[in-house]
Image: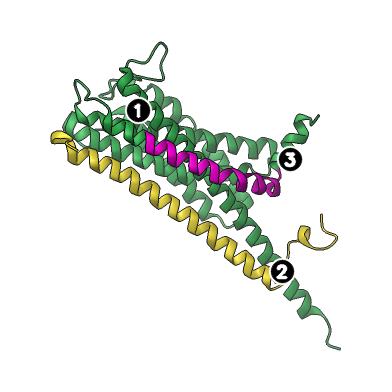
Chain colours: A yellow, B green
Amino acid sequence: MDLGSHAAYIWSAYAAVGVGLALLIVWLVLDGRRHQRLIDELEAQGVRRRSDQPGGE
Amino acid sequence: MVSMSTLRQSLSNPTRFMELSATALPWVAGAAGLLLTFGLYLSFTAPLDYQQGHAAKIMFVHVPTAWLSMFGYVLVAVSSFGLLVFRHPLADVSAKAAAPIGAVFTLLCLLTGSLWGKPMWGAYWVWDPRLTSVLVLFLLYIGLIALRSSIEDETLAAKLTAVLSLVGIVILPVIKFSVEWNSLHQPASVMRLGPPTIHPSLLWPLLVMAIAMSVLFAALYLKAMRNEVLRRRLKALRAYQVRASLDLARQPAE
């Protein structure tokens, strides 16, 4: 694809957006997985929220 | 018939939010992926602009990030208002989730603007009212994130961050009207009184990319809110664990 003399600026702009959004997505996915894993570990040890316990809300 | 207050109570329940968002998130993320693919195709097959040439393609990512950088701040401010006035259970979750996403979109707006400015204006950066006010918006986002993480008491941190975000909303009209203050930046071409001043062959790729990025923003926001609800659940579970071990230690030995 020939983007003329401004090709480097155009590709850099799209790359910046792609990398920026990809990093944001990766951070959010990993952060969510880490929290869920830690919650699962605690629940496996028998730690439960009050609302999850028998007679809870 | 479900009353409005019952519906609001149902949506404001974090457990109900987690159920609804778990169903919605894959669809929203999938829609964002499809729309972005279509938007990128339209962007790279769009005709040349008669003045900017191919460099106008940078506008297809720059303008949506600029719109969403301001929308993100509106989201933070409205959520902060919801926390301070209505004490909505998800308001602080929403404000906290939206801030880093808004910051990333603002940074991308500044970067893509600089990459457009160099070939068009001959400089990556000028202390123009529009550019400077968007930089202030970015610093405001960073300030909100830094303020929240610098205070250990989460309730206090939420309230102080909410107050700062409401004070900072003054930056939005400054950004909007800054193009009329001796600015290099061109005035609004789409969101203006009267029809857009862009040719439809360039307007359509811009609108599709704006919709695609808005849907992506929604997916990121939902995911960030889910993460924050999970973090709060984890904190509550750890508190129960500590309390249970202290109760055990206090029991007299038989």
Asked whether disc 1 touches disc 3, contact meaning CB atoms under 8 Å apart, the reply is no
Check disc 3 and report its element: helix, strand or loop: helix
Is mark 3 in CB contact (under 8 Å) with mark 2? no
- Residue nearer the viewer, A55 or B168: A55
- Quarter of image, res B55: top left
Residue B142 coordinates in the image, percent (x, y): 43, 46
Residue A3 point in image, percent of width and height = 18, 35
Q: Which residue is more in the foreground, B105 or A9?
A: A9
Is residue B21 on the magenta stretch? yes
The amino acid beneath tag 2 is: Val
Which chain letter matches label 2? Answer: A
Q: Nearer the viewer, residue A36 or B36?
A: B36
Q: Residue sitting at 23 percent across and 38 percent down?
A: A10
Label 3: which residue?
A: B10
Mark 2–mark 1 Cα distance, whole angstroms, equals 52 Å
Task: Please give left or right for residue B110 compared with residue A46 in the image.
Answer: left
Give me the C-alpha separation between circle 3 and circle 2. 26 Å
Of the two numbered discs 2 and 1 in the rendering, the one whose residue sits closer to the viewer: 1
The magenta segment = B13-38
Q: Which mark is residue B44?
A: none
Q: Going by the picture, which residue comes out furthest to the left? A: A5
Pick the front one: B180 or B56: B56
Q: Residues within 10 Å of mark 3 (few under 14, many from 20)?
A: few
Q: Which element type, helix, strand or loop, lies under badge 1?
A: helix
Amino acid at dot 1: Pro
Residue furthest to the top in view is B194
| Mark nearer the N terminus (1 vs 3) | 3
The disc at residue A47 is 2
Residue labelled with disc 1: B205
Work out how far the residue at label 1 is from the one at label 3, CA to CA, in angstroms.
38 Å
Chain of the residue under the numbered disc 1 shown in the image: B
Residue B184 relative to residue A55: left or right: left
